Image (cartoon, coloured by chain):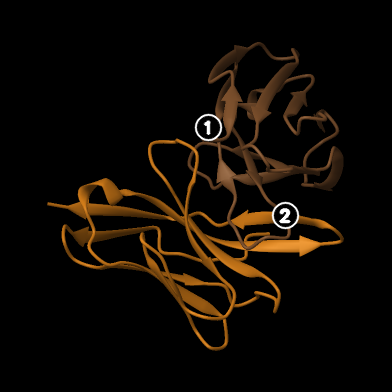
Amino acid sequence: DAGVTQSPTHLIKTRGQHVTLRCSPISGHKSVSWYQQVLGQGPQFIFQYYEKEERGRGNFPDRFSARQFPNYSSELNVNALLLGDSALYLCASRILNANYGYTFGSGTRLTVV
Amino acid sequence: DAKTTQPTSMDCAEGRAANLPCNHSTISGNEYVYWYRQIHSQGPQYIIHGLKNNETNEMASLIITEDRKSSTLILPHATLRDTAVYYCIVRVAWEGSEKLVFGKGTKLTVNP
């Protein structure tokens, strides 16, 4: 079975631009979450989506948005990029209401210059 | 809003047990403790999780104190490939949502 897949793996953007990151969850996983990991820190929660609805949002500005599609894949969008948005963006999926852990993708490394 | 405290780094000899401690004194009754590890900025890898009881799987054992204020992850026979950053995490749930709250992690180095 394929794991959680994220694209692209690496990305370089200029300040002020916008970016779209993509995530495909494990088949059957309807919950998708996004995390930001700045170098040297643990991942921080950005969003959780379940059944195409936003269920939770972390302490991130409105420049960050996301959506989930009918096939449960998800996109994370960041507008007006700042240098501080440079990070590893991780997507995780799991089956809700089941006693399992989250499976993370390998992440997208975003560098803002 | 980190809910866990871990040592910054630890060393372990290859073949020996690695015992990684974690404090989560503010954990609530319905919040699970998860352990993940991360190697070279890859995605975090799930190890084990528990609520109240001790748990064991093919990778590790999780010992949770009776008051649930701390836990220990045990890798019974550490290998060089176990060198990684280990995160002790609390899964927080609220109003139909949930999130993993990561701490800063422990950098475990397994030495030959």
Mark 2 nearby-residue class (10 Å; few <14, some 14–19, many ≥20): some
Q: Residue A97 occupies which quadrant of the picture?
A: bottom right
Residue B31 x %, y %: 67, 70
The chain displayed brown equals A
- Chain containing the residue with disc 2: A
* SS category of the residue bearing label 1: loop
Give whichever of B63, A88 is nearer the camera: B63
- Residue occupying the point 65% across, 43% down: A93
Q: N-terminal of the two: label 2 or label 1?
A: 1
- Chain containing the residue with disc 1: A
Give whichever of A62, B37 is nearer the camera: B37
Q: What amino acid is found at the position of numbered circle 1 in the picture?
A: Ala
Q: Colour of chain B?
A: orange
- Residue occupying the point 76% across, 24% down: A78
Q: What amino acid is found at the position of numbered circle 2 in the picture?
A: Leu
Q: Which residue was labeled with disc 2?
A: A96
- Residue occupying the point 46% across, 55% down: B105
- Residue occupying the point 57% across, 28% down: A5
Relative side of B27 to A88, left or right: right
Relative side of B15 to B98, left or right: left
Q: Which residue was labeled with disc 1?
A: A2
Q: How far apart are the two marked residues, 2 and 1, measured between alpha carbons?
A: 19 Å
